[in-house]
Image (cartoon, rainbow, N blue to C red):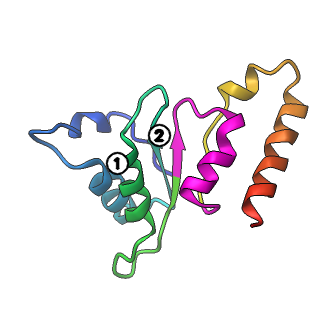
Amino acid sequence: MSHPSLAGAFFHADHGIAPDVLLGDVFRLAGSDAVIYPNVGGRFTFSRATCVAINARLRQPLGPVAPAFPVPAGGIDAARVPHWIERYGADTIFLLGGSLYRQPDLAPAAERLVAAVKRHSDG
């Protein structure tokens, strides 16, 4: 699993590497089976188009390299996970925590999240 720490230095309009190429291709070539990236609407955000492009590159053929799981993160609200499943697909790992920890009782909040994921992943 890869985390994009310090990778932001590469993401500039006039120099560097496009986020979808670095996170979607280079990280896979380096052996990542799952790649964390800042989701649209979160604390550290990419545009919707960039997130879609990263997900596409993580899943598309790349010679003998296996596809990798997209891992949108950075402020994802547990209540919105069904929306993200519909947008990104059930083969996505969602990195979230803060919205669960803000709940008065973590165990029931986690159970609701699991139930919502199951409901939206079975269809």
Relative image position of residue 119 (x, y in whole percent): 81, 56
Q: Which residue is mark 2?
A: 39
Q: In the picture, residue 40 is in which quadrant?
A: top left
Cα distance in 3D space between marks 2 and 1: 9 Å
Magenta stretch encompasses residue 87: yes
Task: Give the residue type at disc 2.
Answer: Asn
| Left or right: 34 in relation to 23 | right
Task: Give the residue type at disc 1.
Answer: Thr
Task: Give the SS element for disc 2.
Answer: loop
Residue lying farthest to the left in this orientation: 14
Relative image position of residue 105 (x, y in whole percent): 88, 23
Disc on the earlier residue, 2 or 1 = 2
Relative image position of residue 101 (x, y in whole percent): 74, 23
Q: Quadrant location of the C terminus? A: bottom right
Q: Residues within 10 Å of mark 2 (few under 14, many from 20)?
A: many
Relative image position of residue 94 (x, y in whole percent): 61, 46
- Magenta stretch in the rendered image: 71-91
| Left or right: 106 in relation to 66 | right
Q: Which residue is mark 1?
A: 50
Q: Residues within 10 Å of mark 1 (few under 14, many from 20)?
A: some
Task: Give the SS element for disc 1.
Answer: helix
Magenta stretch encompasses residue 85: yes
Relative to 8, residue 94 above or below: below
Q: Nearer the viewer, residue 66 or 14?
A: 14
Q: Nearer the viewer, residue 8 or 86?
A: 86
